[in-house]
Every structure is written in structure tokens, then in C-alpha cells.
Amino acid sequence: MSVFSGIWVPLVTPFSNGSIDHAAIRRLVRFYAEARISGLVALATTGEAAALDSQEQLAVLETVLDSAGDLPVVAGLSGNHAGHLREALLRYTALPIAGVQVSAPYYIKPSQQGLIEHFTQLADLSSKPLVIYDIPYRTGATLELATLLTLAAHPQIQAIKDCGGSLAKTVALIADGRLQVLTGEDLNIFNNLCMGGSGAISAAAHVRPDLFVAMADAVAAQQLDHARAIFHQLAPLIQALNAEPNPAPVKAVLANQGWIKNELRSPMTVATPALQARLQDYVA
């Protein structure tokens, strides 16, 4: 089975009085490893990577790797300056990461040929596999199916975090079989697994990771009634965690559980009091 399968957690970046809380990172990594998740993504959207400078990004990644042991870690990489992206890629791939999650360049809205060149140039340079992060509502760039199928031919492009919003595209990618299809939309995890997708990179799996792993295990064992029951148990939690911009709801729950402080970097704001009250139902 590919390393890019199962339930992955795109790890939050804990802060304490404005600084990165590395001790809290270590605690979280151990917790998720014990919950039997398949891997971690550091420096993703949920990790507020855009709010970290380059030195902070590298420090977060190094702390996650130092704490993860045998648990695979993927590094998130995003931006729109080709030179800066190449420099960061070389820094990250010098570390023992399992791969690099790369999004389309935001704000620019390149052509499909430009997107092919963007991912291909990074894949050519990388010594580690790439996971395409297809999330047009954040980047402003839509990766068409033909573009993704072209990129799937590259040996270093091995998986996709699918937030593309197109069921038809998801079905086609799973049927094609060359990319491991990991959904990034938490409400799609059950149907992704049932269609033959590889799993999920799930922000909601920060909370009750044991149930997310149990659901994936049940689908793999063809225990679909059991998996479906777990999904419906998780659905209200997933909906609550997506009620306000990520990662504010996730951080609110983790703070109430004592893992981190409820702190985000501007322009992100903490969850509203109303949502925090709603999320109290999910504090173990």
C-alpha cells in the first residue's frame, strides 16, 4: 500500500503569546501517532503556514520530524514566486520527509499549461514525491482533469489532496489509478474511501482521530455498515468544525482539551463564542 493512504492530519501550529509552541507540537505529534493515523502534513493551510516566516516554517517542520519517529511527514509548500518555491523545496527535501504537498500558485491564475509547468518544474527538482493540493477556492486556479492526468504521468507526482469540488473529476482520478486520491473535504471521506480513494488529509481528524481511523479501517475490511455508522457519528462534528474559517474551530477544541492555547495569527481570528459553546459537546 502507498504511504499516501489512510487518515492524515494536517497539523495545526500552536502559538503561545505570539511565538510557536514547540512543546505543544511535540505533544500533538505523539498523540496522533498513538491514535494510529497514517501520517502528518506540516505547514499546510491548517498549520497557518502563510503566517509563518521561512525560518519559522523550517523550525516547525524540524520539530514535527523530530517527534514523529516512523510516522510519515509531508511538508506543505505554497506560494507564487518560482525562485522562492525552489529554494524552500530544496530545504525541505534535504530533511527526512515522505513528500511535499504543493498547491497551485495563488493570485496569478495561470493557464493550464502554466500549471503543468509549475508542478513539473518542482517535481523535476524534488528528490521526494509530490502531492498536488487542488484547492481552487484558496488559490483561484482550477486544475482541470486533463491537466491532472498529464501531471499523473510524472513519476515524482504520486498523490493529490482533492479539494477541487468536482465529483466527476474525483471519480475519474480514482478510476485512472495513477494518483493516490486523498480527499481534503472532511464530509467526503466516507464516499471517497468507498469509491476506492486512498483516504484523507483531514483537519477534522484533529478531533477524535480514533474514530476517523476506525472508519477507514472498517471500509478497508468491507464492514460498510460499521463504517457508515461511524461516519454519521462524526458528521455533526465535521460540520461544526467547518462552520468558521479553518483552523479556528479545530484550535478551539484542542485548547479546551488542554493540548494548545486558543491562539491564531492575524488576520485569522479565534472561533466565535457561539461556535465555541457548540463545540463543547465534542471536548473529551
Image: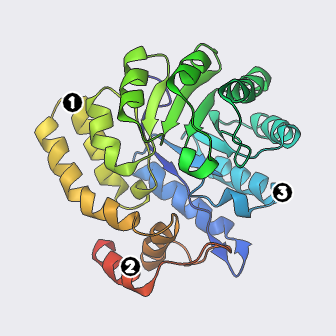
Q: Return the x and y of residue 59 as percentages of the image width and height.
A: 76, 56
Q: Could one spot residue 198 in this view of the protein?
A: yes
Image vertical order of residue 49 relative to residue 111, above or below: below
Label 2: few (<14), some (14–19) or many (≥20) C-alpha neighbours in 10 Å:
some
Residue found at x 64% / y 67%: 23
> Residue beneath label 3, please?
55
Q: Which amino acid does label 3 sit on?
A: Gln
Secondary structure category for the residue under label 1: loop
Label 1 CA crowd tier, 10 Å (few <14, some 14–19, many 20+) = few
Q: What residue type is labelled 2?
A: Leu
Which residue carries the number 1 mark? Answer: 221
Going from N to C along the chain, the mark reached first, 3 or 1, is 3
- Circle 2/circle 3 CB separation < 8 Å: no
Query: Element type at marker 2?
Result: helix
Q: Which residue is drawn at 23% across and 34% down?
A: 219
Across the whole image, how many numbered discs are drawn on residues? Answer: 3
Residue farthest toward the left in the current orientation of the protein: 225
Q: Which of marks 2 and 3 is in front?
A: 2
Instruction: Give the amino acid at mark 1.
Output: Ala
How far is mark 3 from mark 1, CA to CA?
43 Å
Label 3 with label 1: CB-CB less than 8 Å: no
